Image (cartoon, grey):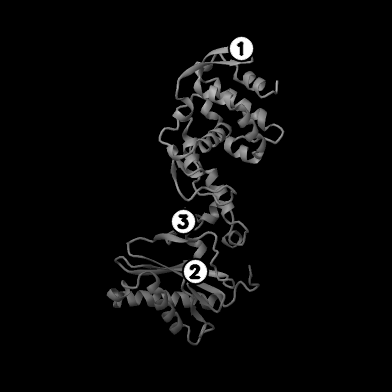
């Protein structure tokens, strides 16, 4: 990333040029509203370029206004340093979806970008602000993008919220990470982010229904669920909520009856080391029968990843015992498991007692 050492290059002159451009555009809108309203989307970009080019005559920016167009960011460049991103809406408001947080198509030499917004809904009006001053949130279309709000008050930008300036964020190797960390910190119980760039895990492009999975795929997902979501062994009314979200966002699988994956079948007797336990809820029988696979998954899953799933810090040394404690703690709330010492059983069958 090339960063200019002259951050105030002709700053006052450029601000005057922008102000004059907005005034001129608003004048055109009053005189010829029918013409201006046809300039939607990319059609407005060359029009603004022509207005700026005319107004730049006799200034430091004469013969330097360049229309970039295409998929590059920003749309117009002045003196290879300043950029103008053009946005429009046909509605009577000042909000729209902005550009990608990643800015992979950003023109290298441009250091200061301004947003010129054309509100083509009646009454037609144009406004311009520094790009970073009107980015309120991050929303997701096919990738994380800024949400533009031309009425945004000072101190309310997404950069204020994540406590990182726009220029610092855009130059990070992974600018998505601070954003996802901020939104993760605001999650309520049972919520998750459905688009996470800073993880190495990837979800399929195709969303599948549970019944379409083969037996191996189903078994693998069940093992992960038992490890990642120990609350499924408890009695909470929303104990499957995080699992249901995870299935869709991380596994691209829709399961209409998540509860049935673990609790269908009621209760059964189960023998462990020649001792028979009566009326064990099916969720624990499934766990005991698959304990080797569960243990293997625990061993290969990084502690830092488990800490995120469990909302509890763990370490490589303690992750197995921490998982056992979490399962046991949740099991204590299950009336039908009150006769079981789940912790002791797990220690025994995992060979840890």
> Going from the N terminus, do you reach mark 1 or mark 3 first?
3
Q: Is residue 335 visible?
A: no
CA neighbours of label 1 inside 10 A, class few (<14), some (14 to 19), many (20+): few
* Up/down of 336 relative to 93, above or below: above
User: In this orientation, which residue lies closer to the viewer: 3 or 267?
Assistant: 267
User: Residue 175 appears at what percent x and percent y?
Assistant: 58, 57
Direction bottom: furthest residue: 58
Q: Nearer the viewer, residue 103 or 215?
A: 215
The residues tagged by marks 3 and 2 sit, at their Cα atoms, a distance apart of: 24 Å
Could you tell whether 54 is left or right of 351 in the image? left
- Residue 49, quarter of picture: bottom left
- Residue 194 at x, y = what percent? 49, 46
Q: Is residue 155 visible?
A: yes
- Residue 78 or 68: which is nearer the viewer? 68
For disc 1, the marked residue is: 275
Quarter assignment of residue 160 = bottom right
What mark, if any, has residue 114 been given in the picture? 2
- Residue marked by disc 3: 142
Residue 326, placed above or below residue 2: above
Q: How far from the left and from the top, in percent, is residue 288?
A: 58, 23
Query: Given the current orientation, which residue lies at the most extreme right position?
Result: 317
Local secondary structure at mark 2 = strand
């Amino acid at each position: 990333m090339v960063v200019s050492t002259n951050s105030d290059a002709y700053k006052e002159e450029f601000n005057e040029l922008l102000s004059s451009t907005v005034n001129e555009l608003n004048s055109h809108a009053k005189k010829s509203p029918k013409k201006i309203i046809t300039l939607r989307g990319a059609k407005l970009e060359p029009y603004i370029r022509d207005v700026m080019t005319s107004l730049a005559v006799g200034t430091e920016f004469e013969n330097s206004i360049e229309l970039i167009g295409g998929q590059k960011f920003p749309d117009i460049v002045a003196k290879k340093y300043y950029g103008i991103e053009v946005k429009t809406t046909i509605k009577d408001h000042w909000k729209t979806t902005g550009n990608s947080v990643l800015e992979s198509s950003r023109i290298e030499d441009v250091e200061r970008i301004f947003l010129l917004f054309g509100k083509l809904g009646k009454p037609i009006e144009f406004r311009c602000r520094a790009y970073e001053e009107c980015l309120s949130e991050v929303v997701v279309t096919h990738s994380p993008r800024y949400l533009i709000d031309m009425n945004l008050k000072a101190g309310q930008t997404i950069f204020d919220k994540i406590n990182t300036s726009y220029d610092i964020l855009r130059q990070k190797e992974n600018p998505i990470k601070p954003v996802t960390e901020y939104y993760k910190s605001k999650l309520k119980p049972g919520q998750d982010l459905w688009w996470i760039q800073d993880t190495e895990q990837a979800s399929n492009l195709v969303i599948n229904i549970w019944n379409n999975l083969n037996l191996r795929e189903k078994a693998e997902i069940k093992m992960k669920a038992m490890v990642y979501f120990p609350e499924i062994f408890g009695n909470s009314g929303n104990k499957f909520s995080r699992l249901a979200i995870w299935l869709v966002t991380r596994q691209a699988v829709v399961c209409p009856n998540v509860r049935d994956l673990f609790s269908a079948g009621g209760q059964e007797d189960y023998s462990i080391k020649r001792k028979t336990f009566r009326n064990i809820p099916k969720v624990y029988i499934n766990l005991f029968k698959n304990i080797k696979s569960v243990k293997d998954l625990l061993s290969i899953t990084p502690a830092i990843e488990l800490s995120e799933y469990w909302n509890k810090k763990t370490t490589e040394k303690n992750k197995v015992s921490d998982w056992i404690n979490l399962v046991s703690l949740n099991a204590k709330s299950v009336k039908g498991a009150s006769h079981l010492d789940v912790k002791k059983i797990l220690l025994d069958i995992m060979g840890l007692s």
